[in-house]
Image (cartoon, rainbow, N blue to C red):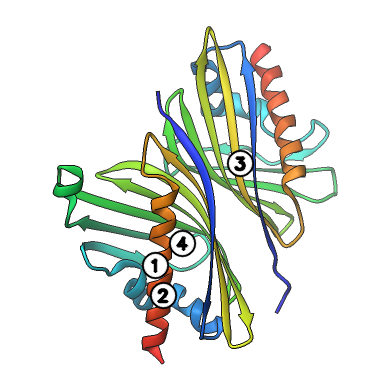
Amino acid sequence: MTTTTHASFIIERRYEASPQRVFAAWADPAAKRAWFVEGEGWDIQSYQLDFREGGSERSTFRFLKGEEQFGEETVFGNESAFDEIVANERIIFTYAMDRNGARFSVSLATVEFKAAETGTRLIFTEHAAFFDGADGVNMREQGWQELLQKLGEHLAREI
Amino acid sequence: MTKRNTVHATFVIERDYAHAPSKVFDAFANPQSKVKWFGGPDEWEKSNHKLDFRIGGKESVSGGPPGGTVHAYNAAYWDIVPNERIVTSYQMHLDKQRISVSLATMEFKANGAGTTFVLTEQGAFLDGYDDAGGREHGTRELLNNLETFLKA
């Protein structure tokens, strides 16, 4: 029998950049790749972003420690579809994660951009369904904490 | 700037059906079956129901009271395990206004000769047009329709 577990989490961050700039880091393929895809320990095999409602984002990346951690060469796939885009205010997307072709989670993510006194308050909310003993919400939340940290470093570099 | 707000909510509905998981699953998977129970009240005007039941496939139907607001449902299928699990992401619109985006998981579990069916909806309700209470109520009515369909 298959098993499914559901969980949700919220991460809030402040960035010293305008909502327009923070939003642009999600909308522009080169900027998004810089903080969302590139990273130590990963060999990026493909990446494409079609940032519009109904558009998709797809990436495949080889986990360099796959043999060590999973006992086999391990390629992850990420497929997203943009459900709603309100420029500088909100992005809603659905995404799936696959490991070696097997889907292990589907999530609904909402990113809200709110003008704060000296920058932007970003609220990231994820609703997720994890399948068949996948790692689950703690690892996922940690992953997004790291990504949103990298987004902040990307914005700081841009100035 | 327009005033945007997003309310997140989750609800779970569990139902026991006397029919085997394969029969309950088929009511979701087979377009000729699903059109018979999935939709608004009988008195509503309805569009054609379209269902491409495969991972990556889409589903759409819309309807509303004659001359009134059109309620539109658009879904994408993200995971399908025959007779066990279906995961969709779906949007609701009232006329042109998007009111929600939801992740819906349907689980079909053998329970004796019957099925325990569990629906989990994790939703983002947008800009004050709808809320989880209204959505859960509507979903329960659809599952009542499903039960009537299965018994027929």
The quadrant the N terminus of chain A occupies is: top left
Q: Which residue is mark 3?
A: B121
Q: Residue at x 27, y 43 (%)?
A: A101
User: Distance between the Cα atoms at labels 2 and 3?
Assistant: 30 Å
Q: Which residue is mark 2?
A: A151
Q: Determine the chain carrying the residue at label 1.
A: A
Q: Say which quarter of the image contains residue A91.
A: bottom right
Drawn side of residue B34 relative to residue B2, left or right = left
Q: Say which quarter of the image contains residue B44.
A: top right
Q: At which x and y percent is residue B104?
A: 56, 40
Front: mark 3 or 1:
1
Closer to the camera in the image, B98 or B49: B98
CB-based contact (under 8 Å), mark 4 and mark 2: no
Front: mark 1 or 4:
1
Q: Which residue is mark 4?
A: A55
From the viewer's perspective, is residue B50 above or below residue A139? Answer: above
* Label 4 vs 2, first from the N-terminus: 4
